[in-house]
């Protein structure tokens, strides 16, 4: 497994990270088995993954609790990342979404952050978090000042409760607001070879500023594994229904492209998921790829993608074919 540092810190993490959103279950992901989830986490760790990313809102604390159980006795070997800023404890903050009777708000005031970090520490069964990230930024017109948010995060760092500071779902302007107060170590944006919008401005800025990126959804919710065929349907409310690439007319084009990469999977002795992961972490500005897994075999498969080094000409060929897809209809 290849390792990279988070920002300018000395924290070394695996290029493939275990994303624990699905482990929380709920309407987005359906039923989950906590014992199987723990086995999936252990399989990832055994395969060389040391970076685990979760959040309180994933299953209303369930994901953090499952991760906490899984890492008992192995905490010192793990780079643990979680988040704050999606708030459902009272009516403060602008409403973001409603689910399972919870009203989730984007709220990043210092008092809320202080509560969230303590709750996360308790659920995770640890006394420090390696990378603490704001999950979604507070929107206009009720924006919580980023300067206040960052000052609170820096205080938590001084107290030893967190080791590094990150921000998810941010733009360059917001990053600069964080940087005006203190050192921002990482961002977490959405990115896959089918969704490359951040290549235009965000990733080049992060390269310039030595800010790491932990990209989420690099396998486009499983579509880029090639395992989701044309006969697959999704229940109402499933997250994949919101992604245009899953519409049949678009899915057909993606599957045809993936089928054409069989010579590459044979060349590198890998499967499609591993090929796509290796391509993703080879892109300028992409530091880590967050890959979800609820089964041990998925964890092992994803981890192997972090061991592959693709030839430059193959990276270029894959990009050319991806770009030829155009925008989803």
Image (tube, grey):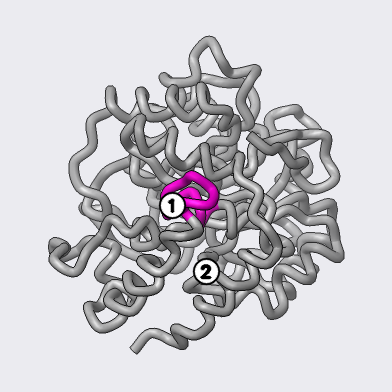
**Residue 281 in view in this figure:** yes
Query: Which residue does the numbered mark 1 point to in the structure image?
Result: 273
User: Label 2, on which residue?
Assistant: 193
Q: Is residue 274 magenta?
A: yes
Residue 180 seen from this side: no
* Relative vertical location of residue 306 with respect to residue 1 in this rendering, above or below: below
Mark 1 surroundings: few (<14), some (14-19) or many (≥20) residues within 10 A: many
Quadrant where the C terminus sits is bottom left
Residue 11 to residue 186: above or below:
above
Q: How many marks?
A: 2
Q: Which mark is residue 146?
A: none
Which portion, as a residue range, is magenta?
265-277
Name which quarter of the figure residue 126 lies in.
Answer: top right
**Residue 299 coordinates in the image, percent (x, y):** 42, 35
Residue at the image position 66 percent from the left and 49 percent from the top: 309
State the residue in front, 273 or 157: 273
**CA distance for labels 1 and 2:** 12 Å
Residue 101 location in percent, x, y?
22, 53
- Please provide percent x and percent y for residue 108: 58, 56
Instruction: State the residue at coordinates (74%, 75%).
Output: 173
Left or right: 216 in relation to 156: left
Q: Is residue 188 left or right of residue 61?
A: right
Residue at the image point whose x is 72% and y is 77% from the top: 201
**Residue at image x 49%, y 85%?**
324
């Amino acid at each position: 497994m290849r390792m990279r540092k988070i920002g300018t810190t000395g924290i070394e993490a695996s290029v493939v990270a275990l994303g624990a959103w699905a482990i929380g279950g709920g309407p987005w992901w359906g039923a989950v088995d906590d014992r199987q989830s723990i086995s999936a986490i252990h399989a990832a760790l055994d395969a060389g993954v040391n970076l685990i990313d979760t959040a309180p809102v994933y299953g209303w604390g369930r994901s953090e609790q499952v991760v906490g159980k899984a890492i008992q006795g192995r905490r010192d070997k793990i780079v643990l990342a979680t988040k704050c800023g999606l708030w459902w404890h009272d009516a403060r903050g602008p409403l973001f979404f409603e689910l399972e009777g919870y009203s989730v708000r984007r709220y990043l005031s210092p008092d809320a952050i202080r509560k969230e970090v303590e709750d996360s520490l308790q659920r995770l069964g640890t006394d420090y978090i390696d990378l603490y990230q704001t999950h979604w930024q507070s929107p206009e017109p009720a924006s919580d000042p980023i300067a206040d948010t960052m000052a609170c995060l820096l205080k938590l760092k001084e107290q030893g409760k967190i080791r590094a500071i990150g921000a998810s779902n941010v733009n360059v302007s917001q990053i600069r607001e964080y940087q005006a107060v203190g050192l921002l170590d990482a961002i977490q944006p959405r990115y896959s070879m089918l969704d490359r919008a951040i290549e235009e401005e965000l990733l080049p800025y992060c390269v310039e500023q030595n800010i790491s990126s932990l990209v989420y959804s690099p396998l486009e919710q499983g579509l880029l594994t090639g395992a989701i065929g044309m006969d697959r349907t999704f229940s109402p409310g499933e997250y994949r229904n919101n992604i245009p690439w899953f519409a049949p007319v678009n899915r057909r084009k993606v599957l045809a492209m993936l089928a054409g990469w069989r010579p590459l999977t044979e060349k590198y002795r890998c499967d499609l998921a591993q090929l796509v992961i290796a391509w993703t972490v080879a892109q300028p500005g992409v530091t880590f790829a967050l890959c979800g897994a609820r089964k041990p075999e998925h964890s092992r498969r994803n981890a192997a993608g972090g061991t592959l080094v693709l030839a430059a000409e193959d990276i270029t060929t894959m990009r050319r074919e991806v770009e030829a897809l155009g925008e989803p209809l």
